[in-house]
Image (spheres, helix red, strand yellow):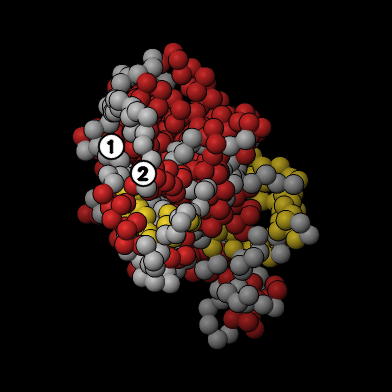
Amino acid sequence: MIGVSCTNLVKRYGDVVAVDGLSFHVSRGECFGLLGPNGAGKTTTIEILEGLLEPDAGDVEILGLRWKQHDRELRQRLGVQLQETQFAEKLSVEETLRLFRSFYHRGRTLDDLLRIVELESKRRSWVGKLSGGQKQRLAVACALAGDPDLLFLDEPTTGLDPQSRRQLWELLSQFRQQGGTILLTTHYMDEAETLCDRVAIIDHGRVIAEGSPRELIATLGAPRVVTHQGTLEDVFVALTGRHLREE
Amino acid sequence: MNAIDRGGAWHPMIELALARLREFAREPEAVFWAFIFPILMSVTMALAFPGGGNKPAIVGIEPGEGSAAVRSQLAREPGITVRDIPAGREARALREGDVHLLVIPGNPPTYRFDPARDESRIARLLVDAALKRAAGRSDPWSAREEPVQLPGSRYVDWLIPGIVGLSIMGTSMWGIGFAIVQARMRKLLKRLVASPMRKREYLIAQVVGRLVLLAPEAGAPLVFGVLVLGMPIQGSILSTCLICLAGALAFGGIGLLLASRARTFEAISGLMNLSTVPMWVVSGVFFSASNFPQAMQPLIQALPLTALVNALRSIILEGAALQSVTRELAILAVWGLGSFALALRIFRWR
């Protein structure tokens, strides 16, 4: 069954080509990672898939449906976490979650959601008083409010401390175990290696490599891996001659 | 599957309006301005324009030969107050309005005053009559006077409905505009449209969420006017409330429209000032809109603030019925609905 399928996506901003003929497919139940440096086109791609941006060319299919005909149904079945969303500071955790829950015709209870993201003790705290990790867990809780079949996450752990990252990874693994599909972007190699079944490495708006983290690391020649265990970072360096986190 | 389960939450429109209201109520400065500003303005106006009582004409006398005689003649006169001015400061006293008229004693005396100032022209008449009488003029008769003080005819009575209109315009537009731009800057709008939320419900909720605040916002200057300044409300309270509601909806729609594209506080402030400041001046809040040339009248009468203030004055001061302000209500409805429809079309959610 199709989770996400996109074919030959193109998106231009004036002269800049942000997405340049990008294709990949994600099956239901899979966790798929878009990996690449800042400016590679990850966010543009995921926003096209989320139905927030219109591609200049190419075809997008989500859960077997298309944005043009099934916008409302798709929105009910997707969970979305965007980069840089700041929720209203003077609403409480519970009030924020309740607002998002009200948009969905079915889904989890507020108590359930608060428990899943471990924010029960913070339910009456204002969003402005939360730590970075807590805010990000609230964002994921809002994405989970409608009990989605597919979760889009744009750099879910950027800027978080190691403990908060592990907490979030744990949460996403649980979502997977219940049959959920995840598409996420990241520029952390360890995140992709921990969470993703398959990754597509993106650079300059194109997929330059695709496969499971293990497969990709295996493509590295033996000499590269003498001093330490190979990582996706090595794969990227091998493909482009540049490092992922620089730029 | 057909039954909608919102997990204990209410309809999205109610939740959105509640969120809006909570955010406002938790912003102390916003509350202060919404409630205190109209009262402060009314108090200031009440102090500047005390009702009833004639204001005396204030007259200065240039020192010199005969000035003592002129002084004693004028000081006897009711309605004239003589104010001493240090020598050499006469021109300044006239310009600043410290004296309305300067008498230079002589035979005949000279009056120095600005004929463009109403109070100076009145002072001239009073002083002239007093000095001529002192010089021996006899009046053929003196008319019987019947002073009339109609309740609701003072300037301050006329002003209060204007302040109510200003308050509704200001708080509706600024409140909605800033909240939307802030949500846009925080990428919250983008997150909301990524959810199944309906766009028009969000926009309606922004306007409706503020209506709860209308009672205190419009009510504060009205209650102050009635209780402290003794302004009578001749028409029905219900009609007054309905007009205020129509005004809040109209300006709410305009607020949405102005905020529909703006990305920064600077941009929205500019748009708000550009649209509200001209109405402060021309819509007849502080002085009658009929002071402006005939050619401008169709435009001025079509402005939402003019319609709101005129309707409020008709109901409050003249006791008019709601049907007699149909035209004003129609103008407000067109502004509100038109702005809302346009805002929904051009709104920037990113």
- Residue furthest out toward the right: A15
Q: Secondary structure at mark 1?
A: loop
Nearer mark to the viewer, of 2 and 1: 2
Whether discs 2 and 1 lie on one chain: the answer is yes
Q: Is residue B58 left or right of residue A125?
A: right
Q: Does residue B211 appear in the picture of this structure?
A: no
Q: Chain of mark 1?
A: B
Which residue is labeled 1 in the image? B52
Q: Is residue A238 left or right of residue B140?
A: right
Q: Chain of mark 2?
A: B
Which residue is labeled 2 in the image? B136
Q: Mark 2 vs mark 1: which is more N-terminal?
A: 1
Expressed as whole percent of the image width and height from the top left, the position of residue B233 reads 29, 25
- Contact check, label 2 and label 1, Cβ < 8 Å: no
**Amino acid type at mark 1:** Gly
Expressed as whole percent of the image width and height from the top left, the position of residue A118 reads 28, 54
Residue at 63%, 75% (x, y): give it. Answer: A247
Q: Does residue B227 appear in the picture of this structure?
A: yes
Q: Is residue A140 above or below residue B144?
A: below
**Amino acid type at mark 2:** Gly
Residue at 46%, 45% (x, y): give it. Answer: B121
Question: How much space separates mark 2 and mark 1, taking CA atoms?
Answer: 33 Å
Residue B39: which quarter of the image?
top left
Q: Nearer the viewer, residue B302 or B24?
A: B302
Residue at 49%, 28% (x, y): give it. Answer: B307
Residue at 64%, 65% (x, y): give it. Answer: A39
